[in-house]
Image: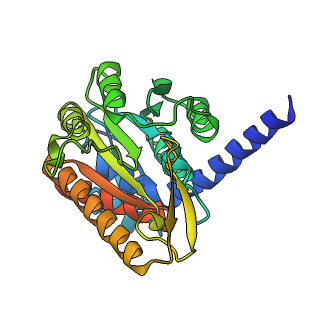
Amino acid sequence: MDARTKEMLKKVRTVEIQTRRIVHQVLTGSYRSAFKGSGIDFEEVREYCYGDDVRAIDWNVTARSDQTFIKKFREERELSILLVLDLSASGAFGSSGVSKREYAAELASALAFSAALNNDKVGLVLFSDRIEKVIYPQKGRKHVLRILREILFHEPIGRGTDIVTALHYVSKMMRKRSVVFLLSDFLQFDNNVPQSTKDQPMFRALRLAGRKHDLICGILSDPRENTLPSAGYVEFEDAESGDTIEINTRSKRFRKKYEDLTTKLFSIRDNAFRQCGLDTMHLRTDTSYLKALRLLFARRSGRHT
């Protein structure tokens, strides 16, 4: 075994330990409430986890012990979770000690282990301006570790973004309705389509995918994408196209114009998501993804009550 392989295995193991702890302590009950049905057959009594539905508490068993217990039911259906990650070059950007891709990898790992702990199948699609890697949904720890390894170490061939192609592939790949987490910065806009952003090809594809699957969009961003520092003349490069431009960032007028423009762009994008009726998570690299997950799970759990 060479040094690089040993380092990869060490990294995967470290992430597994960290992620499992987070999932056990924070996400287990919330995940069940957000994605599981109420069940039809009683299966067992187990200890209460944070986020579990309080209506499932078994008060008789709880009264006879020092712990809170809930009734567990055999689920009505088996879930398939598909993680769809954007590996385009813009994901390498990060100003808070972690890039957008690294942030997405941590979140995807937590979702994969949550699915595994609930005996759900989990699969993976990595894409850029092409489909980079596909792992069909399966169960088990070894399968999740394989997914984790690809998320952390896959080197993409493409640099651009093609969300439309990725969603078309997912629709053909997953015949049955599944829970699909699509993690991207969603900065793929067609400038030839003006204000009616919901009519852009990307959003048309998102609407179609949302009708077939339970689609959840994780919108990745970095605080520096909306503001520029005063650093004199700086050459900026488009990570995906390679185009460069030199800008005088000392210009207060230019920095304000840039901030107004990006704020407007992000507002149009977010409004289009609302018009499409899709579940979204706003994921900033300078904040914990756990808060976004809790909000998502709580919102979805409320619909099931």
- Coordinates of residue 240 in the picture (x, y in percent): 49, 42
From this viewpoint, which residue is outermost toward the bottom? 252
Position above or below: 263 against 244? below
Q: Residue at x 36, y 53 (%)?
A: 219
- Coordinates of residue 85 in the picture (x, y in percent): 45, 39
Position above or below: 176 against 241? above
Quadrant containing the C terminus is bottom left
Quadrant containing the N terminus is top right
Question: In the rendered view, does 232 fall on the left or right side of 258?
Answer: right
- Coordinates of residue 266 in the picture (x, y in percent): 29, 60
- Disc tally is 0
Question: In the rendered view, does 8 fall on the left or right side of 30?
Answer: right
Q: Nearer the viewer, residue 209 or 232?
A: 232
Q: Nearer the viewer, residue 68 or 197?
A: 197
Position above or below: 31 against 66? above
- Coordinates of residue 74 in the picture (x, y in percent): 32, 37
Q: Residue at x 17, y 48 (%)?
A: 194
